[in-house]
């Protein structure tokens, strides 16, 4: 953690929270015993103050790993991020990081997509991912991440066909008893 922007980028990757939600996180929003972050507000750069989240479903408690909880605790002097926040600060830092790593261009919001795609690709339920992202309903999640689900379906089809083609053939006696 070299900067508060690094912390914001990591929070985006670990939680899938929106930039305004991340900027609004305070120490009071983190439960270090339960390893959760309470998303209940957003920081609006337009009016430069705390505001409501995008919708009521965006009010949520996000589970985090014990390791990430410790990292947040150890870097709590950066919170709240909006006290350090100015327009495009996080995006500039992200650009510096991806340029240094020679990764194709990403917008800050793409970290949210990366988080969701990672979970979906690793078989986390669409219902859970939808709630974790604060979507109004799973239809929104399905619309945004349909490509990921299609890729997973193709992968699962390959696994199923491989399994079916390698399964033992039924003996004539088994067929008669079936």
Image (spheres, rainbow, N blue to C red):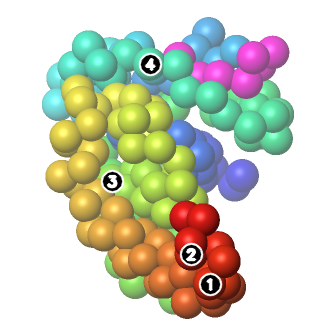
Which is more N-terminal, label 3 or label 4? Answer: 4
Q: On the image, numbered disc 1 is attached to which residue?
A: 172
Q: CA distance from mark 4 to mark 1?
A: 57 Å
Question: Does residue 160 show up magenta in the picture?
Answer: no
Q: Nearer the viewer, residue 78 or 34?
A: 34
- Res. 118 in view: no
At x 34%, y 29%, the residue is: 134
In the image, residue 9 above or below residue 73: below
In the image, residue 39 above or below residue 9: above
Q: On the image, numbered disc 2 is attached to which residue?
A: 175
Q: On the image, numbered disc 3 is attached to which residue?
A: 109
Q: Between label 4 and label 1, give the one nearer the viewer.
A: 1
Circle 2: element type: helix
Circle count: 4
Which is more N-terminal, label 1 or label 4? Answer: 4
Q: On the image, numbered disc 4 is attached to which residue?
A: 60
Residue 105 x/y as whole percent:
36, 78
- Res. 139 in view: yes
């Amino acid at each position: 953690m070299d900067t508060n922007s690094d912390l914001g980028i990591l929070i985006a990757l670990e939680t899938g929270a929106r930039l305004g939600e991340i900027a609004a996180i305070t120490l009071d929003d983190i439960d270090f015993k339960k390893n959760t972050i309470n998303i209940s507000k957003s920081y609006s750069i337009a009016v430069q103050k705390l505001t409501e989240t995008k919708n009521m479903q965006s009010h949520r408690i996000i589970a985090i790993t014990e390791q990430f909880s410790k990292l947040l605790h150890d870097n709590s002097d950066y919170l709240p991020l909006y006290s350090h926040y100015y327009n495009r600060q996080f995006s500039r830092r992200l650009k510096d990081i991806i340029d240094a790593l020679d990764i194709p261009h990403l917008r800050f919001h793409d970290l949210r997509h990366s988080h969701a795609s990672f979970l979906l690709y690793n078989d986390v339920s669409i219902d859970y991912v939808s709630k974790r992202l604060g979507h109004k309903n799973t239809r929104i999640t399905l619309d945004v991440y349909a490509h990921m689900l299609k890729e997973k379906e193709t992968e699962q089809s390959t696994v199923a066909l491989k399994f079916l083609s390698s399964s033992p053939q039924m003996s004539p006696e088994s067929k008669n008893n079936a």
